[in-house]
Structures are given as structure tokens and as C-alpha cells.
Amino acid sequence: MRKHLTILLLPGILFILFAGCEKWTGQDIYKRPAWLPGKLYTAVSVQKNLSLFAQCIRLSGLDSIIGVSGSFTVFAPTDEAMRQYLSENNYSGISNIPKEELVRITKFHIIQDSWSLDQLKILGSDGWRIGDNKNSNSYAYKRETILKNPDEKYWIKRANNKEMIVADSTMADGYKMVYTPYRKFVPIFYDEYFTVNGLTSDDYNFYFKRAFEPGNVYFGGAKIIQADLFAENGFVHIIDKVVDPMLNAKERLEKEFPGESYKLFMDMVNWYYPKFAANTIATNNQPGVRLGANVETLWDLDYAPLAFNLQKERFSTINETLVKHNGLIAPTDDAFREFIDGVLTIKSGFPHWNDYKSLPADVVDIIVAQNFKLTPFYPSTSQYKKIFKGANRYHQNEQDIIRKDFGSNCTFIGLGSYIPDRVFTSVTGPVFCRPIFSTFRLAMVYSGTYDAIANYNGKLYFFPITDYTLMSDSSLLLNWIDKDKNTYNFKAYNRQTHKFEVLSSRTISNWILNQVGTSTTIGSADKEIIKTLGGNYLTWDHSNNTIQGSLPGLYGYKGSIVITNSPFPLDESTDNGKSLTVKTWFNFGN
């Protein structure tokens, strides 16, 4: 009975199986199920309000990358944002954007790896942030885009065992191809980052010309208006504005606008600071090497001792780059030339430096290096207030700011008018502008006294001594330790022991401060009693134009021959007193 039952059931079972197989084979087994989102290009193209950016992805060829593999996050501008971009740049359509520019724009809107909206706000320099961490390094705000500048050719001029970068190839002795190792970075702003770093909405508005609305996340100057559109290989976040590829410091200084250029400042940077080193690994990793072809040597370019390298998109490590940024201030060519021709060089009408390419390193550092900072400029920060709202030795007028850009490796502030450092306009001006005072100038830098003198709030008499005089009596001799590194000290010939002595910075400071007169009183007829910054007193007899300390001046360090000092005026205009040169150090005994 059991055997007959089995035989009767078997045809029914086979019928069901065959029927099921026939239904399955009728389907396309390779067809994508409706519930799968697809790759990133598909996720963008199916959105009705992202059709123009989808066109950007396709025409730039990036659909063959983000639409196939990898892990990325796309910040996609709406069609309205794209139309605004086309209008502002006078393009009739996406296809009219030059291919190179189209690729740059599109790549800048794509960052490496997959980031949800929440993940964009919880990354720190050492990984995911946990808990209520008040450490600013726990709030990463920059991300690496897929946009990378190509290796770049720099024209080189060689002189005095140095290599300078020149803009004009006809002046060059050759060129070097500089290796670009890193992609560009973009800032992503959110509430917690502003709070922990003490920043405000006004700081954001300063660079991006729009208010930061709490509770939102911003990709550069664009607000994320719809987040977390999921794709198989990442996320799509819809933004309300096209973000132009951010420029690094080099690109910003080289970019010209109608009536606005920063190339003169850039020329000075390129004349004094570049240092090249061959990058053997990058050179040998070029594709042609494997084929036995001759390839260009690739070089690393460094701008030490400037705070950061103009062209590098990254700090020393990727983690540091995510949480930190740089700052740069630069005057326009017209503003900078007014200082160079009117104050710094012989075009001023005084025996100053021949031109801006003949300056010593310490003078260049005062002009250039202090404009480079390791932190960004925000109006609410002390660094910004010190320069634009203070009266320090180096300061600028906030009203002279004509450009404010948040770049890929620094914030940039462009000045339409330039206020020179007060070492060039105060009583120290003749010392910093006349080559004949080079030893005295370096002694001021070495001892730090230049800051106290130039920053003094009140009228001064300043009595510097020329190089010729200091060399003649051997009272202050410059001793170079390493000229390339701008390191040195000072010696003096002791006329009692007949030996050279190394002078401490404190000794030099006392000497220099006693060459600076402050408050004055009237002594007997025609005599002026002047207190020095060093705390001693000078007597200036105007009847015969002689001046001395409590004792007559002596020839040389611890000498015995009396020298009469008769001040000779230096005619440069100064903003805090008078400068007059004398023949020897003022003497106050022990």
C-alpha cells in the first residue's frame, strides 16, 4: 500500500518542480532588483534635481570610476545651483565648460571614502570621537577630495650657490619638475567644530559670504540640504551651491583679477625661500622607468623657514591636516611696490638697498615670513585682532582688506593698501634700510631690542653706529656660524686683555638700549639731559653738538682713547622720533 502511494505522489511532485523551474527561467537572473540603489553615478543620475551634475560626472569621465568601484562621497549641487554657476561664469551649458575645468570642478565635489552625515561630524585626528571631548584635535573638519594638481614645472635661476624661482622663462637657467604628492582638501563645517574652536557664524561669513545656520553642515560655502542618499559604494549629499576648487597659497598669489595682482609678493617669496631636493622614489615610480625610458627628475620643493609650503596641500601627516589650517596675508602689487620704492630701496631717495632682490635674510623675514601663519585667520581670534585691530609693530587696517578666501591649504587675506612693519618707519628705519648699518641691525635682531625700540610709545632719539666704525674700533664684530641658516654671534676685541671676546645677547642689548634716548629735560643753557632705554643718562650739548654718557666715549671695547661724539642726522622720515649716527658707544663706566 505504501509503495503504491509513493508512485501516485511522484507525478504531482514532479509537476510542481517543473512548473517552478519554468517560472524561474523566464526571468532575467541578471536584472538589478528594484530595491538595490546602484553605484554612485546611478544614485546621482536617478535624482530629478541632479541631472546637470550627473552630466558633469559623465562628460568628465568620472562615471567610469564612481559608477564602477571604489568608495567615495559625492556632494552634488542641485540643478538650480548648477544653472547659477553657469550664469556667473558665462557658460551656456555644461558642455561649454572647458574639459580641464569641468574635471576639476567635478573632482572637487567628490571626497575619498564613504561618509554619512553623522560620520562627517565625529571624526578626529586619531579616529572616531567618543563622548564629550573638548579637545579641538578631536574635531576634524577637512576631507581629502579626489582632485590632485599635476606635477608642475618651475623655472630656475642660479646665483651665489642658490636657486631662485622666476616667472619669466627667458630669465631662467633651466627648470625643475616639482612632484605633487597630495590631493586638495575641502573644509566641512558643523556646530561642534565651531563651538570647540571658539569660532562664530561671523567667522564663517567672513570667508563664505553667507550665514552659518546652526544645525546644518556645510561643504565649503555650500549647505547640505539633503543627506545620506545611499549607494553601493558611498553616499550622495545634495548641496545648494557649486563650490569652486579651492586654491592653495601658490595658486592664489599667482591668480590675477582685474586691477588686482599679488605677483610681486610671490616673486619675493620665490627669490629668497625655495629649496629643492631630488625625490628619488617619485622619480623611479614614473611609468616610463619600467619601460627603460628617460624620465624627468622629480623634486620636492620646500619654503623653510616660512610657516608652511605654498604649494603643499597637506601638513606633515594626514591626521594633522584634518584638524589644522594655515593663514596668509599679502599686499597687492601696487601696495607692495609703494613700500619697496618709497621706503625700502634707493628709489626712496636715500642710500637704501639697491632693489628688493638684494636684501639680507633677516630683513626679508620681517617683510615676508610674518605674513605666513600656522593657524587660519578668523575675525574672532586673537591672531586676527592683533594684526587688524591692534597697534603692534606689525599691523594692518581692516578697511584695507579687499579679498578674503578660504583656500585648500590656508585662509588668504589680500590687502589693497599696505602698512610696513614699524622697524622700517620708526627711528630704526635707517638701520633696517641702509646697508651701512648691517652689523648694528643684526645686533638689534640678535638681542631682540628692535622690537622694544620700534614699538616704543613716545618720541625717541636713536644713535646707531655704522659698520665702518664698528669694524674700525673692533667693538662689535659679526661672526657668521652658518650663513645659509642665518645663524651668527658677535665678538669684540678687548683692548685691555688684547683678546677677542664673545658677547652675550644681554650685553649687546644693554649697549643698544643705552643708544636710545627717551624722556628729556633741560640742563644748563644749551644742554639737554636724555634718559636712555637702558636706564642711564646722556648729556647733549647743543652749543657744540657733542653728546656723551656719564663718561666720554672711548675708542674700542674697554679702550683708553677718548672719542668725541657729534651726532649726524639721518634724514629719513620716522614716526616716533629722530635718528642720528654717532662714532662710538656711549660710556657710563662700570
Image (tube, grey):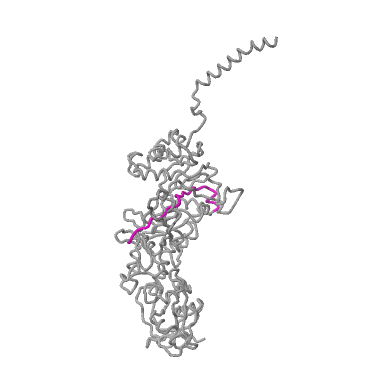
**Is residue 390 shown above or below 405?**
below
Q: Residue furthest bottom?
A: 561
Quadrant of the image occupied by residue 303 = bottom left
In this orientation, does residue 353 appear? Answer: yes
Across and down, in percent, residue 202 comes to 47, 52
Q: Which residues are magenta?
A: 173-196
Q: State the residue at coordinates (41%, 81%).
A: 471
**Is residue 213 shown above or below 402?**
above
Q: Residue furthest left?
A: 170
Q: In screen coordinates, is 313 left or right of 133?
A: left
Across and down, in percent, residue 58 comes to 40, 37
Across and down, in percent, residue 164 comes to 37, 63
Number of numbered callouts drawn: 0
In this orientation, does residue 406 appear? Answer: no
Across and down, in percent, residue 155 comes to 34, 58
Q: From the viewer's side, name the closer residue of 413 and 303.
A: 303
Q: State the residue at coordinates (50%, 20%).
A: 26
Image quadrant in which the N terminus is located? top right
